[in-house]
Image: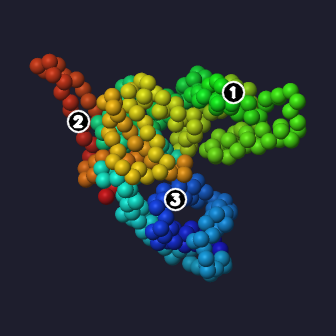
Amino acid sequence: MEGKQILRHLFREIVKDTSNKDRCSLQFSLLAEYRDVKDDEAMLNGWAEELVDKYPQYFKGFALVNNSGSNDENENEENEENENENNSDFESNFESNTETVNVVRRLTLTTGDCFYSSIFRSAVEQGLLDQIMKCLKLSGKTEIEFIASFRHMLAKRVKADKLPKQYDERLKKEQDLYEVLYDTYHEKIPGMTNETSKEKLTTYKQILSVSPVWFRTAFWNGLPMREKFLEIVAKGVDTMKNWVGTIEVEMTAYLLKKVCKINLVRHNTDPKTDLKSNDEDGQPILHLRNLGEAHWEYYSFDLKKTIKFPLDGSYPIVVSVEAKKGGKRRVTRKKRRGLVFAN
């Protein structure tokens, strides 16, 4: 059976599965992966077959047979209709399954840029975008340009060897990701047996297995010297549509807190109580949703959805200028016409 037929069936079943509270996130993740393989029929078919094994609950009683007699033109039309139908389902169901009364979940860009998109859109809604762009010295006139600038800023920090560190309980010291990988891949402890060494290598690959594909692919067969590692990671971080990993997320949270005085809170489950827009010190909070460490979304306090973001990342950045009239700051907004907004 062709991959597209399998995917159409899978998407229909996911939409019907109201018991799965994370079905919206699953749909977005699958769409993002689909865009990466859709132009290669062999890869698409292979990926679709893997999905059958991965989600057997959605394929009970489903006959995996070839339909070679289908009309390509009609099939393409059906694909387009189903994709539009699925996108509609995303938007209609997107704000459900959130048990708090003061926030709703919001759409973000897909294809690897969802993390930065969630920061951008949340900041726009809370009036924090100007502050972030100034304190991090970012540039751009649209959402997609903001993302490119944000990536480039992080990549420069990586290349300058400013990786975020975490405290290692076993070693009683702070380590960055390279040091953790080095410890699990290279460290030779006196008296270590081959079996122990094998276990450490397994740990190394376990770390990589939960990393973005581009990161996992680059280091699966070995860990280079630190300078080369930083060069590869910096290039990956700077590349649009690459999924984010531990380095980008932790570095972003650190910079927003340290430099911009803005908290970044990552939610792995939907909150069951109201969320706060500011902490006890009055510093604002951006609430990001990242269930299953896959697609990034954000929680919005804009219940009426007064701000609508285009699906292509062309939302114009509000430009603020200071005018010394009567000693007060005047804010002007530049509007752009001809944008197609999502409903």
Residue placed furthest toward the left: 326
Image quarter (top left, top right, bottom left or bottom right) of the C terminus: bottom left
Between 41 and 128, which is closer to the camera in this rendering? 128
- From the image, tell me which residue sits under label 2: 333
Q: Residues within 10 Å of mark 2 (few under 14, many from 20)?
A: few
- In which quadrant of the rendered view does residue 280 lie? top left
Point out residue 324 in the picture as x, y percentages from the top left corner.
17, 19
Question: Residue sitting at 26 percent across and 30 percent down?
Answer: 320
Point out residue 94 in the picture as x, y percentages from the top left corner.
39, 59
In the image, which is nearer the foreground, mark 1 or mark 3? 1
In the image, which is nearer the foreground, mark 3 or mark 2? 3
Between 284 and 69, which is closer to the camera in this rendering? 284
Question: Residue sitting at 21 percent across and 32 percent down?
Answer: 332
- The first of marks 3 and 2 along the sequence is 3
Q: What's the residue type where badge 3 is placed?
A: Leu
Question: Residue sitting at 57 percent across and 23 percent down?
Answer: 162
Q: What's the residue type where badge 1 is placed?
A: Leu
Does residue 20 appear to the left or right of 91 in the view shown?
A: right
- The first of marks 2 and 1 along the sequence is 1
- For the residues labelled 1 and 3, the Cα–Cα distance comes to 37 Å
- The first of marks 1 and 3 along the sequence is 3
Q: How many marks?
A: 3
Per the rendering, the mark at residue 24 is none
Viewer can see residue 137: no
- From the image, tell me which residue sits under label 3: 26
- From the image, tell me which residue sits under label 1: 171
Viewer can see residue 127: yes
Point out residue 249 in the picture as x, y percentages from the top left corner.
52, 37
